[in-house]
Amino acid sequence: MTSRTLWLVVSATLAAANVASAQSGHLTLPRTVEAASAFSIESSGSGNATLFIVGPGEVLKRDLQLGETASFAPGSLSHAGHYLAVLRSDSFTDSDSFDVVPTGKPANLSFLAKPSRLPVELHNAITGAVYVFDAFHNLIAAPTQVAFELSNPAGTMQQRTVTTRDGAAWTAMDSTAQQGADKFTARIGALSSTRIVAQVPGDPCALKMNVHPDGGKLELTTDPVRDCNGNAIPDGTVVTFTERYGGTQSTVDAPLKRGVAAATMQVHPGATLSVASGVVMGNQIGWAK
Amino acid sequence: MTRFQLLLGIGTGLLAASTLRAAEVPVRVEAAPVAGPRTLEQQSKEAVIRDYLRAWESFRGALEHNRPELLAADFVGTARDTLANTVQQQAQLGMHTRYQDLSHDLQILFYSPDGLSIELADKVDYEVQVVDHDKVITTQRESSRYLVVLTPAEVRWKVRIFQSVPE
């Protein structure tokens, strides 16, 4: 094999396929070919040869006559990566490498949002991460602007624009004050991906109990239980009523029904009544009668 | 037993790296800041690097012996599908390829907020040997920068994206 007997030129037949070429030894190759673009390889000399294109993403093999052009149709090489082109004849072997690069047009977003459910009004508690791909599932490493939007049913929206680095971008958003199903969207132009983030009420706030005597018993009821932003605490949330008297304590756990918890306890003059939900304490009432 | 024995030490510049035994491959890990809000613990860092380097062994074995099943332990998703397809193409053409990594220069780029993906860059030097019907066609030394995304599986990190990019 000598450089005088062979030269091989790989050139793009589409403008998108090749913008620069490199010469190394006996080969002149495009530095880059855009994924799935048509391209051609020209050889010189005479006789039969076999052309191999080898990479982790794809392998091609083609017999050709030296001096002819081997044309590769669109889609022949769609996986981005580093490829080796080898021309093998009876008398020589020549090779060089080139890169297949993503198309540069985002076509797929891999968007992960966490968590899917969280309390309202937490700072930077919702996170989203995006990887950007072209139509052939190649990671687009070139910087790309991604718009993140978090919108709630009331119409408020948080927006961030982040530029990808090596194909990835991330952001963090606050959960809003209002409960509901928020839409968390990552967008590049017309391409978008949306996740639903459920925002649920926070802890009860200003938990208040009322007491009414009913014969020898006390009827204890709460006001409608809400968080500090006015969101109704969901039914089923347990409220604990406690009565302390004479060194004794009795408790009743009652789930919220239609936003209110209720319980009945025995009357004990001098008792102290209190209410709580989880770690949140409500008011306290002394029963002297 | 992996042929990689990675030694990581925290330093102000580069993490010392290295290896190894007879056919061992030098590995250098750059101590650049990792993008993302989540702290990457040293144990996780070592695990992801160890699993990535092990994936190179699977990759090499699968393409040398045209055995796509060797990919299953270390690759998943797009990376596994793509490499398995390449193995199938090789088998149909009566070819195989031997990839021998010679050195790795790693940098962890991004740890996603949810902890479900880690992206790293690897400037890898390797040899590729092309074999056609048991005849060695060529052996070339190459250098390329890979972008790699790994995601956690049951007991290890698996490579989900394995793509070289022009430097």
Image (cartoon, coloured by chain):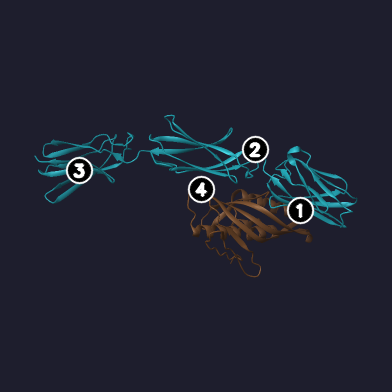
Label 2 environment density (alpha carbons within 10 Å; few <14, some 14–19, many ≥20): few
Q: Are marks 4 and 3 on the same chain?
A: no
Chain letter tied to cyan = A
Evaluate whether residue B118 shows in this view: no
Mark 3 lies on a secondary structure that is strand
Residues at discs 2 and 4 in contact (Cβ within 8 Å): no
Which-is-in-front pick, marks 2 and 4? 4
- Mark linked to residue A274: 3
- Quarter holding the N terminus of chain A is bottom right
What separation in Å lies between label 4 and label 3 (alpha carbons)? 46 Å
User: What chain letter is assigned to the residue under label 1?
Assistant: B
- Residue A239 percent across, percent down from the top left: 26, 42
Residue, far front: B12
Q: Chain of mark 2?
A: A
Q: Which amino acid, mark 1?
A: Leu
| Amino acid type indicated by mark 4 | Gly
Amino acid at circle 2: Lys
3D distance between C-alphas at marks 1 and 3: 81 Å
Mark number for residue B93? 1
For label 4, the SS is loop
Residue receiving disc 2: A105
A249 or A44, which lies in front? A44
Report the mark closest to the observer, 1 or 3: 3
Question: Where residue A27 appears, x then y in whole percent?
Answer: 81, 51
Alpha carbons under labels 1 and 4: distance apart: 44 Å
In whole angstroms, how far apart are the C-alphas of marks 3 and 2? 63 Å
Q: Chain of mark 4?
A: B
Query: Which label sits in the foreground, 2 or 1?
Result: 2
Q: Which residue is mark 4?
A: B36
